[in-house]
Image (cartoon, helix red, strand yellow):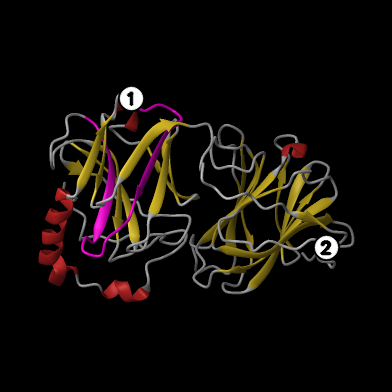
């Protein structure tokens, strides 16, 4: 099983966890012969499980194993047709490349690979001699992948789709273990979601102890966001700012996909030479609605920034350091908001809920 792009292409355009700068000088030409030898060896280290029934929505695959130092990559393949080395169609190819510290997803059809995908929602999570657990859930339009309980990436179905799969193969892992079942929740190994505290004003810290907020978090808002209240998020922006998203959702989960009452997406990489970043507002209620776009954010990469989301009578208002950067009308009952998700280049340090009155506002 040889991916023709294995040593020829890197995609540095990732939401989080770009490849370290010293790896930009990785000499593929010099190491190509060694890589081919290691590649051949890893092909001999494989485990294949034939599917007794087709994958369907909610199919849940768990793979555990331990990367070894002598094999530079490992892969999980969801394949169609009869298993034949180097020729079988592969619906999803999840390829962990340890020397480059990134993960490639791809599809092979009729012996040809498609374009690689490498974007991820968290830093590279794999380490040599450290056991991992990968969870895969099959959705109607994509597969979702989690590592050790944290959502890592998603991969939109291509042709052939996983629904035609006949086998699953793990290559390059000596102690690989596979379990295939059904689930109604993903990730099943996710840690308990922290609860967002309520306080009396933006100047008074919450009385309860704040959790240690991690990047790419999901937190619960059990009592929701009352009218006239605001959600306050203070965090540091990534120095090489690319993009981030703040979502108000009806459930603290990754899958089944929750409804998103408010989606705030700041895209600094779009026409990055301009003095204001692009802000995209939307809602996902079974499908994405009409976007509202405005170039209103003046964010300074690497700085500590406070975002406030205020629930008004008919709209959500979003502020960055007391500057209004956007408003979106309520597209569903705002009382249904029960969770917050933060993804990308915003690293939260403090999150709480408080009344919005008496908070200063700048134009």
Q: Which residues are magenta?
A: 54-80
At a point 43% along the width and 55% down the height, the residue shown is 120
What is the residue that sits farthest to the top in this orientation? 53
Q: Residues within 10 Å of mark 1 (few under 14, many from 20)?
A: few
Residue at horizontal 12%, vertical 59%? 36
Residue 131 lies, in percent from the top left, at: 37, 56
Q: Is residue 62 visible?
A: yes
| Residue 298 or residue 106, whichever sits in front | 106
Instruction: Please give the name of the residue rendered at 33% of the width and 76% of the height, measured from the top-left corner.
Output: 22
Q: Residue 342 falls in which quadrant of the image?
A: bottom right
Q: Is residue 289 above or below residue 344?
A: above
Q: Quadrant of residue 47?
A: top left
Q: Is residue 160 left or right of residue 333?
A: left
Residue 293 seen in the figure: no
Q: Is residue 291 above or below residue 160?
A: below
**Residue identifier under label 2:** 207
- Label 2, residues with CA under 10 Å away: few <14, some 14-19, many ≥20: few
Residue behind mark 1? 54
**Numbered mark located on residue 87 in the image:** none
Mark closest to the chain's N terminus, 2 or 1:
1
Q: Where residue 272 sits in the image (x, y, percent)?
A: 50, 66
Q: Is residue 44 left or right of residue 17?
A: left
Element type at marker 1?
loop
Seen from the viewer's position, the closer of residues 220 and 314 is: 220
**x and y percentages locating residue 329 in the rendered image:** 73, 42
Left or right: residue 300 compared with residue 94: right
The residue tagged with tag 2: helix, strand or loop? loop
Please identify the quadrant where the C terminus is shown.
Answer: bottom right
Circles 2 and 1: CB distance less than 8 Å?
no
């Amino acid at each position: 099983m040889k991916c023709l792009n294995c040593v020829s292409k890197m995609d540095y355009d990732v939401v989080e966890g770009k490849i370290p700068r010293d790896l930009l000088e990785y000499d593929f030409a010099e190491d190509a012969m060694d890589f081919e030898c290691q590649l051949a060896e890893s092909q001999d280290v494989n485990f294949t499980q034939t599917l007794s029934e087709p994958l369907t929505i909610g199919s849940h695959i768990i793979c555990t194993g331990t990367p070894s130092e002598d094999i530079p990559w490992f892969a999980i393949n969801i394949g169609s047709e009869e298993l034949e080395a180097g020729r079988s169609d592969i619906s999803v190819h999840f390829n962990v490349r340890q020397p480059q510290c990134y993960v490639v997803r791809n599809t092979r059809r009729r012996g040809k690979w498609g374009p690689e995908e490498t974007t991820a929602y968290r830093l590279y999570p794999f380490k040599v001699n450290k056991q991992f657990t990968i969870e895969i859930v099959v959705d109607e339009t994509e597969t979702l992948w989690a590592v050790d309980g944290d959502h890592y990436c998603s991969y939109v179905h291509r042709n052939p789709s996983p629904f035609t799969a006949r086998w699953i193969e793990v290559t390059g892992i000596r102690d690989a273990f596979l379990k295939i079942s059904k689930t109604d929740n993903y990730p099943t190994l996710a840690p308990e979601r922290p609860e967002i505290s309520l306080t009396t004003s933006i100047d008074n810290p919450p009385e309860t102890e704040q959790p240690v907020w991690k990047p790419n978090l999901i937190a619960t808002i059990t009592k929701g966001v009352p009218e006239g209240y605001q959600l306050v998020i203070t965090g540091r922006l990534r120095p090489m700012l690319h993009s981030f998203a703040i979502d108000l959702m009806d459930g603290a989960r990754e899958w089944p996909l929750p409804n998103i009452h408010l989606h705030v997406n700041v895209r600094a990489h779009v026409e990055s030479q301009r003095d204001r970043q692009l802000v995209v507002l939307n809602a996902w209620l079974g499908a994405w609605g009409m976007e509202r776009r405005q170039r209103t954010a003046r964010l300074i990469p690497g700085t500590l920034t406070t975002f406030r989301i205020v629930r008004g009578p008919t709209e959500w208002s979003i502020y960055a350091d007391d500057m209004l950067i956007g408003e979106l009308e309520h597209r569903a009952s705002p009382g249904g908001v029960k969770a917050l998700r933060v993804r990308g280049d915003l690293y939260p340090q403090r999150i709480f809920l408080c009344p919005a009155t008496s908070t200063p506002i700048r134009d």
